[in-house]
Amino acid sequence: MGFKGIYKDKSSASKVGILFLLIFVSAVLHTFVGALIVYLFAENGLQIIQNQDLSNQISVNYLKLMQFFSAVGLFVSPTFLYAYLTNFDFKFLAISKQNSILVIAIMLLITPFIGFLLEWNMMIPFPDWLLSSDGKSEAIVEAFLNMSTYWDLLFTLLVVAVVPAIGEELLFRGYLQQKFGKWFGNMHTSILITAFLFSAIHFHFQGIIPRFVLGVLLGYLFYWSQSLWLPILAHFINNAQAVLFSYPSFKIESSAYSVLSETSVDPIMALFSFFAVIFLLYMLHQNISIKEAD
C-alpha cells in the first residue's frame, strides 16, 4: 500500500496541521542540507554561514545556494508532499498562448505603477524597530543582483524568480486562497486575506503595499483562470525582470524597472501603467469568460 492520499479523509483542521508540520520539518532539513554543502565545499564555509559577507562574490554565491535550499524547503517540497498525501488539487490546468501573452504584458506594464506605490510606501513613517529587517533584506537583494557573468544571471534567475514563483504560488494561491475561499464562502475575501499574508510574510514593511497589490492581482489571475500556471507565470515575470534589468548587458536606469535605481518614477508613467493594466485585465477576463462559455 502506497502513501498517496492516505490523509485525504482527515478533517480540515488536521490537514492544516499536517501541512504546517511538513513545512517546518522540510524547512529545517533543506536549510541543514544547504548549510552542510556550504560547510563542506566552500573555503571557510563556517565563516560564510555565520558572517554573510555581502562584499565577497563567492560568499554571495553560496548564500544564493542556501537561499535556494531554504525556499525549496519552505514552499516547494512540503506543498507537493502535502498534495500527494491528501490528494489536494492545486489546479494546474493548461492556459492558452493568448492569455499567457496578456499576462506577460500586464506584468511588464504594471511595473511603473508598482514602483510608484513603493516610493509612496517608503514615505510612511514606520517605527524604526519595525524596519530593522528592511535594511538587511535590501542589502541582500542588492548583493544578489550584482552579477557579472551569464552563469550569475541564470543562477540568480533560478533563486530569485523560478523557485519563488513556483513555491510561493503553490502555498498562497494554490493552497491558502482555495482554503480561505471554502472557509469564508467568498473568494474576494479569500484573495484579500491571502494577499495580505503574502505581503506580510516577506517582512519588508517599506514594500508591504505594492506587494499586497501584486498579491491581489495574482489572486484574481488564479480565480479567473482556475489555473495556477497563470499566477506562476505572472510571479516569474515580475521577479525575472528585476534580475534581467540589473544585469549589465540589459541594465535599465529607470527606477520603474531597476531595483537599484535612485531616480523617481514619473507619476504620468505610473498613471499610464495603471490604466493600461486595467484595460489588459479586462481583455484577459473577457478571454477567460468566453472560453468558459464555450
Image (cartoon, helix red, strand yellow):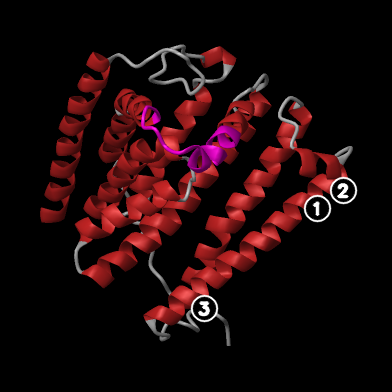
Q: Distance between the residues labelled 2 and 1?
A: 6 Å
The quadrant in which residue 151 appears is: top right
The residue tagged 3 is 4
Marks 2 and 1 close (CB-CB < 8 Å): yes
Q: How dense is the environment of label 1, judged by Cα within 10 Å: few (below 14), some, or many (20 and up)?
A: some
Disc 2 versus disc 3: nearer the observer? 2
Question: Is 129 one of the magenta-colored residues?
Answer: yes
Marks 2 and 3 close (CB-CB < 8 Å): no
**Circle on res. 36:** 1
Disc 1 versus disc 3: nearer the observer? 1
Q: Is the magenta stretch mostly helix, strand or loop?
A: helix
Of callouts 2 and 3, the N-terminal one: 3
The residue tagged 2 is 40
Magenta stretch in the rendered image? 122-137
Q: Is residue 198 above or below residue 235?
A: below
**Residue 12: image location, x then y, percent:** 38, 79
Which amino acid is tagged 3?
Answer: Lys
Marks 1 and 3 close (CB-CB < 8 Å): no
Residue at 61%, 30% (x, y): give it. 139
> Is residue 226 something that shows in the picture?
no
Say which of 257 and 195 sits in front.
Answer: 195
Q: Is residue 208 above or below residue 271?
A: below
